[in-house]
């Protein structure tokens, strides 16, 4: 069964919801716990772990993705991503985006908008796709 690719707007709103529903509370909590708002590594670590681990344990979804009806899946077998897949998707892709000074991220944005399969660079690195689910 071929899944319908998730387009730009559903991915955008999923990220926005993750930021509001998870990122903002984590930011506030970590600022309370550390007593600082300056370069809070605790927030960054918690958000990294959230985006890395939740899709592994929740069928390819984050809170935002679940609310938008989309999920990450492996292209090869349409199964949920494992920890290795998510490490490739998040860590290696972030490195690629960093060394290209953000140009890779902009290219990915255009790929999601214009490619028929809606896959970005990080999807190709990890062998994943973001699809709609019922």
Image (cartoon, rainbow, N blue to C red):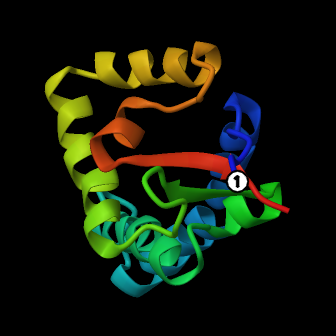
From the image, tell me which residue sits under label 1: 1
Camera-side residue of 1 and 52: 1
- Residue at left offset 34%, top offset 81%: 34
- Residue at left offset 57%, top offset 25%: 112
Q: In this picture, is 34 found above or below 98?
A: below
Q: In this picture, is 4 found above or below 23?
A: above
* Disc 1, SS: loop
The answer to whether 42 appears left or right of 30 in the picture is left
Q: Position of residue 106 (x, y in %)?
A: 42, 17
Number of labelled discs?
A: 1
Q: Residue furthest left?
A: 99
The answer to whether 27 appears left or right of 118 in the picture is left
Q: In this picture, is 55 found above or below 129?
A: below
Q: In this picture, is 89 found above or below 95?
A: below
- Residue at left offset 68%, top offset 46%: 2
Q: Which quadrant of the figure has residue 11?
A: top right
Camera-side residue of 3 and 20: 3
The answer to whether 89 appears left or right of 69 in the picture is left
- Residue at left offset 19%, top offset 21%: 100
Camera-side residue of 56 and 35: 56
- Quadrant of the drawing holding the C terminus: bottom right
Few, some or many residues within 10 Å of mark 1 (<14, 14–19, 20+): few
Q: Position of residue 55 (x, y in %)?
A: 51, 71
The answer to whether 109 appears left or right of 33 in the picture is right
């Amino acid at each position: 069964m071929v899944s319908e690719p998730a387009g730009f707007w559903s991915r955008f709103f999923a990220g926005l919801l993750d930021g509001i529903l998870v990122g903002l509370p984590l930011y506030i909590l970590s600022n309370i716990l550390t007593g600082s708002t300056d370069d809070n590594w605790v927030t960054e670590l918690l958000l990294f772990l959230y985006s890395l681990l939740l899709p592994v344990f929740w069928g390819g979804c984050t809170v935002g993705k679940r609310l938008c009806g989309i999920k990450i899946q492996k292209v090869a077998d349409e199964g949920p991503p494992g920890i290795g897949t998510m490490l490739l998707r998040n860590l290696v892709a972030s490195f690629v985006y960093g060394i290209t000074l953000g140009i890779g991220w902009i290219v990915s944005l255009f790929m999601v908008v214009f490619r028929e399969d809606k896959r970005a660079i990080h999807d190709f690195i990890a062998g994943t796709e973001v699809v709609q689910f019922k």
